[in-house]
Amino acid sequence: MFDTPLSRTIDSANQHEFAVKRKQWRQSVLADSALQHRLAMIEEPEPFIAATQAEALRLGLTLPATMIAHCLRPDPLGLDRFDQHVPNTTTWPGPGWRPIALVSAQGEWAIDWAHFAGQALTQPFYEDSLRAARQRPFNRLMRVRTSLTTLIDAAPVQMAVPDGLIFHLSRCGSTLVAQMLAAIPGATIVSEPPPLDGVIQLIQANPDLPTTTAIALLRAMAGALGRPDNDGATGPFVIKLDSWHSRALPLLRQAFPDAPWIFLYREPIDILVSHHRMRGMQAVPGMLPAAIFGFGDAHALSLDDYAAHVLASICQGVLDQPPHHGGLLVNYSELPDAVLERICPHFGIMPDAASREAINAASKRNAKAPQDLFRTDTDQKRRSASPSIIAAAAQVGDAYRALEDRRNAAMRDSHVR
């Protein structure tokens, strides 16, 4: 067809009609959690389009296959989070939905959600799971977005509360711990969820925000991330935070006063070698607000010195907490045995024989590449450390020794009792 003003008008009219019908379809689907689950389970576009058309016809709606297909275009980079469409529902979506992003839409903060189709969070990071969920045809067509206010105001009275919080120094076994806990049947282990980081950074960037609002935001986001799926699984719920979140530890303790927490750490030289090979965002100036770590001109430092300052700041966030204040210090050298011997009891997790076997099996796998077996690399890292890395590691020495002193004192006290 020639592109004429008339053809464009007809096309525009068709799109408007489709948008109206799609909105009606969305409202009907959002009221039926069983239907949501059935449609979300379909991974391929063609059978999803056929199922969607059949369900629409049942509702008296005709949705053209070509227009549904247009909505299902792949978005592997998740660029739709930059879409400026306003929130389209004023309630939390039903079971199976979890937050996937904190976004800015037309000058206001909002939450994007995706249906995870009952898939357990077994990937090394929450971002791996949400990326897969985001690409499901159902989520491409539904596009559920709520306001930040709705996240708080529409939160259910009974929300999931974490049984434990994992803080860490980075590159020190926290992913291994999370993967071992995730092996427990029915467990919900949320590993470094970007939406929670977004909320924490939003709070840190707005110091005038009332504490009650900040706490409500944290509780609502955690509750949304850890909500039971369609099967109502009630296993342990643990959040592994990003390494820089130790700087928000006091606020997180206020939000979850009854949640025990651990801090995993390792010899600084090993961590710095890892970041020198492949730097995490916290080890690159400008990737995170320098104010989080109490820096001035971060760009005046070498990359290794900058990373060392970050590590020292993360440690200090933990050392500023009173000893025995709900926390447990765990050195990388204690892993993997510490998961069953110290971490599970600290979190109040009592795995049965089958769960212990699953945990032990997970301990033998490479946490970030579960298809591979785990192989220790400590000796190799020590041998490869350059003089600049050794010098940078010395800047974290006092903080590391203070953590070791506190850990050893706590272990002596536990033996005495």
Image: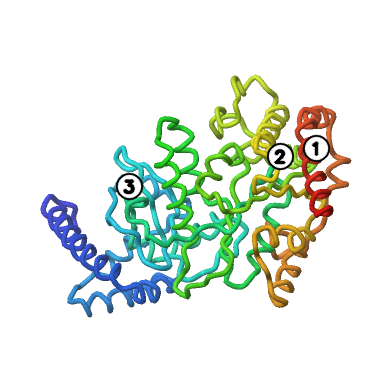
The quadrant where residue 24 appears? bottom left
Depth-wise, is mark 3 or mark 2 nearer the camera?
Answer: 3
Mark 1 or mark 3: whose residue is earlier in sequence: 3
Residue type pointed to by label 1: Ile
Mark 3 or mark 2: whose residue is earlier in sequence: 3
Q: 38 or 400: which is nearer to us?
A: 400
Residue type pointed to by label 3: Thr
| Location of the N terminus (image quadrant) | bottom left
Where is mark 3, residue-wise? 149
340 sits left or right of 212 in the view: right
Q: 24 or 190: which is nearer to us?
A: 190
Furthest residue in direction front, as rendered = 417
145 sits left or right of 358 in the view: left
Q: Residue at x 73, y 40 (%)?
A: 277
392 versus 262 height, above or below: above
Q: Are marks 1 and 3 in contact (CB under 8 Å)?
A: no
308 versus 227 height, above or below: above
Mark 1 surroundings: few (<14), some (14-19) or many (≥20) residues within 10 A: many
Please, what secondary structure does the residue beneath circle 2 have? helix
Depth-wise, is mark 1 or mark 3 nearer the camera?
Answer: 3
Q: Residue at x 43, y 32 (%)?
A: 206
Where is mark 1, residue-wise? 269
Q: How many marks?
A: 3
79 sits left or right of 279 in the view: left
Q: CA distance from mark 1 to mark 3?
A: 44 Å
Where is mark 2, residue-wise? 275
Please, what secondary structure does the residue beneath circle 1 have? helix
Q: 133 or 226: which is nearer to us?
A: 226
